[in-house]
Image: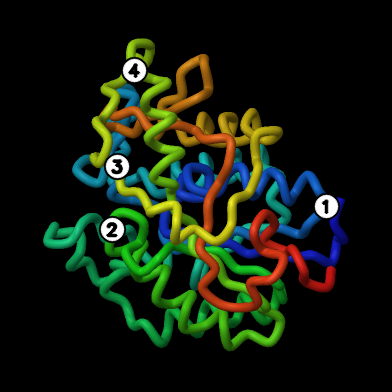
Amino acid sequence: MISAQAKLLLVHAHPDDESITTGGTIARYAAEGADVTVVTCTLGEEGEIIPPSLGGLGSWASDQLGGYRAGELASACAALGVSRHRYLGGIGRWRDSGMAGTPSAAHPRAFSGGDVEEQAAQLAEILDEVRPQVVVTYDAFGGYGHPDHIRAHEITMAAAPKAASVERVFHTVSSRDAVAAGLAALRGHSPFRVPEDGELPVTPDETITTVLDVRAHLPAKAAALRAHETQVSVPASEDHFALSNDVAQPITPNEYFVLAHGPAEGAAADLFGGLAK
């Protein structure tokens, strides 16, 4: 167990991102006694919808998906043991931008088109309130290039290193080798299309600074992923998932990070390693 004074804050773009990329990490540190806060920047209004029965929620229909996904996120956070959750600027302040070049990117509340300084100030206010030692967000590419992920990276890197309490900032990434091994294990038994090596965005393992063992917390991660029923499908094996594109993605026994700010000593296998806790 780590001290209850250990505080972790994660900045994510949409509901489900917290579970997909860092669900094991959240569940591990929550189980170990850390204070874990998730900040979500939008309601994910532009997401595609998997269950046909919920298709009327979409932005192309009643445009009620954001409210529904807020409920999914609350269930996922409960499954992971999140201590507190915040929406950047308050719920509904920023809207899912969709992919670059789509009409949704021009919406007046689109997150990627908002004022960077305003958004960074909103995050700084949360950082000052929560006072985390460790902050996690995406890399400069946003993991896979989504404009909202990139903006989440930008405002986190603008605000977190300046916050008085923050000692480390990490970028969540996917391991090239772990993804390749996971996909190889899925071939022949997944109900989804298993992509070829190189199709999914990954990070070369030689650039990864921190490997976090989360295998004991994969049931919690799977439960959180299932809570996002409009966006994620998880088979009974719980070793992979798929989004609305029906492309399999492995759930790996480790989660991976690149240290972007702060001391490296002690951080190889623990986000808090070497820090006073």
Q: Tell me where residue 98 sits by quadrant.
A: bottom left
Most foreground residue, 60 or 30: 30
Of label 3 and label 2, which has the lower sequence position?
2
Q: Secondary structure at mark 1?
A: loop
> Tag 1: residue type?
Gly
Most foreground residue, 201 or 85: 201
Q: Secondary structure at mark 2?
A: loop
Name the residue that disc number 4 marks: 187
**Alpha-carbon span between mark 1 and mark 3:** 33 Å
3 vs 2, front mark: 3
Name the residue that disc number 1 marks: 33
Of label 2 and label 1, which has the lower sequence position?
1
**Alpha-carbon span between mark 2 and mark 4:** 28 Å
**Alpha-carbon span between mark 3 and mark 4:** 15 Å
Residue 159 locus on image (x, y percent): 52, 82
> Taking 229 as reference, is 101 above or below it?
below
243 with respect to 71 (left or right):
left
**Alpha-carbon span between mark 2 and mark 1:** 33 Å
Q: Are marks 3 and 4 in contact (CB under 8 Å)?
A: no
> Tag 2: residue type?
His
Residue 200's label in the rendered image is 3
Most foreground residue, 100 or 109: 100
